[in-house]
Image: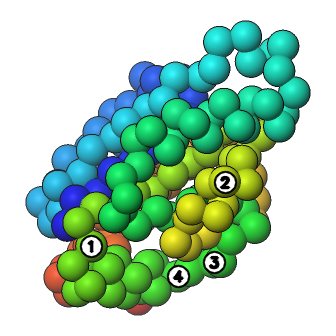
Amino acid sequence: MKILLLSIGKAHEPYIREGVEDFTKRLNKYFPAEWKIIAPVKNAAALSADELKSTEAKSVLSVIQQDDVLVLLDERGKNLSSPELAAYIQHKANASARRLVFLIGGAFGVDQSIFQKADFTWSISRLVFPHMLVRLILSEQLYRACTILKNEKYHHV
């Protein structure tokens, strides 16, 4: 199974890049993983929030393949503990998912079409974080989940 980490927004800021790259490199020891950053829409300020989300959705849907398992990150989603996230990943791997896609939406969230396409909506917190920080948290939590699956020492109960 491959993991695609998909985010709408600007490239990683230098203060985040190092951590994201480190945890993604660690994650690659368990599953092939890569980031794809979808650039912000040009003239976004001239669009309504709904128009912006619709435009972003087209970009996202052009990347997602028919048989991908899409996990949408949204503060209104289901909270999971780190062991529960590990179990979810293991379940998808056992079900022979070819690619697990984690999506961090745009500044105004995502279009309804993305919610409908999502196999699971996950909240890493009920708090709202800057997208750059969510990238770091996501990459770390996926790495942590993999160490849990391999019964390694990184995660302490």
Q: Which residue is mark 1?
A: 97
Secondary structure, mark 2, is helix
- Which numbered marker is on residue 113? 2
Secondary structure, mark 4, is loop
Task: Inspect the image, locate mark 3, and give the three-letter code of the amino acid beneath it.
Answer: Asn
In the picture, measured across the screen, residue 143 lies left or right of residue 28, that is right
How far is mark 3 from mark 2, CA to CA?
Answer: 22 Å
48 w.r.t. 6: above or below: above
3 w.r.t. 12: above or below: below
Q: Which of labels 1 and 3 is toward the front?
A: 1
- Verify CB contact (< 8 Å) between mark 1 and mark 2: no
- Verify CB contact (< 8 Å) between mark 4 and mark 3: yes
- Residue density around tag 2, few if under 14, some if 14–19, many if 20 or more, within 10 Å: few
At 81% across and 15% down in the image, what residue appears? 45
Q: Which residue is mark 3?
A: 79
Task: Inspect the image, locate mark 4, and give the three-letter code of the amino acid beneath it.
Answer: Ser
Q: Which of labels 2 and 4 is toward the front?
A: 2
Q: Position of residue 101 (x, y in %)?
A: 40, 57
Q: Position of residue 1 (x, y in %)?
A: 20, 67
- Which numbered marker is on residue 81? 4
Task: Inspect the image, locate mark 2, and give the three-letter code of the amino acid beneath it.
Answer: Ser
Task: Inspect the image, locate mark 1, and give the three-letter code of the amino acid beneath it.
Answer: Ala
